[in-house]
Image (cartoon, helix red, strand yellow):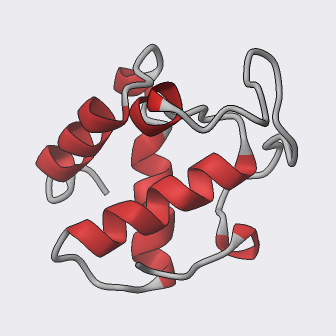
Amino acid sequence: MANFTSNDLLFTGYSKTVDGGDNPKYRGVLDREKVDKTEEYEVVYFCNQFLSKYNVPQTKESFQKVERLLHNKELKQENLRADLIKWIANNWNTIS
């Protein structure tokens, strides 16, 4: 898996700790299925995971592109990991 960190993120203002509805001790199905786009560690993990699964350059620029696409207005209400990954993969070459 790619190994970029929070220092490589493009955007700021993420929660550095678990926020809102998350239970920090819960590591079950919902954590595997959903992404909290406000939590720094989840965004970093998601971006690294995407880079590892898809044939895209393993660069900081690609890491930040995943982050930008993750926050695209079309995904505002989406938090299911599979749907986010599918949308980003389908739009990788059409949106910069």
Q: Position of residue 64 (x, y in %)?
A: 51, 65
Is residue 85 shown left or right of residue 9?
Answer: left
In which quadrant of the rendered view does residue 87 lie? Answer: top left
Examine the rendered structure and indicate whether residue 28 appears above or below residue 96.
Answer: above
Rendering quarter of residue 17: top right
Residue visible at 59% across and 50% down?
43
Question: Residue shown at 66%/64% (left/top)?
Answer: 9
Look at the picture and state if 65 lies above or below 91. below
Q: In the image, is 50 to the left or to the right of 83? A: right
* Camera-nearest residue between 52 and 93: 52
* Left or right of 22 in this view: 28: left
Q: How many marks?
A: 0
Q: Residue at x 42, y 85 (%)?
A: 59
Q: Nearer the viewer, residue 34 or 78?
A: 34
46 or 8, nearer to the observer: 46
The residue sitting at 24% across, 67% down in the picture is 53
The quarter in which the C terminus is drawn is bottom left
Residue 39's place in the image compared with 40, above or below, is above
Image quarter where the N terminus lies is: bottom left
Residue 30: horizontal and vertical position, in percent? 49, 25
Query: Measured from the top left, where is residue 28 in percent x and y?
Result: 52, 33
Q: Nearer the viewer, residue 48 or 95?
A: 48
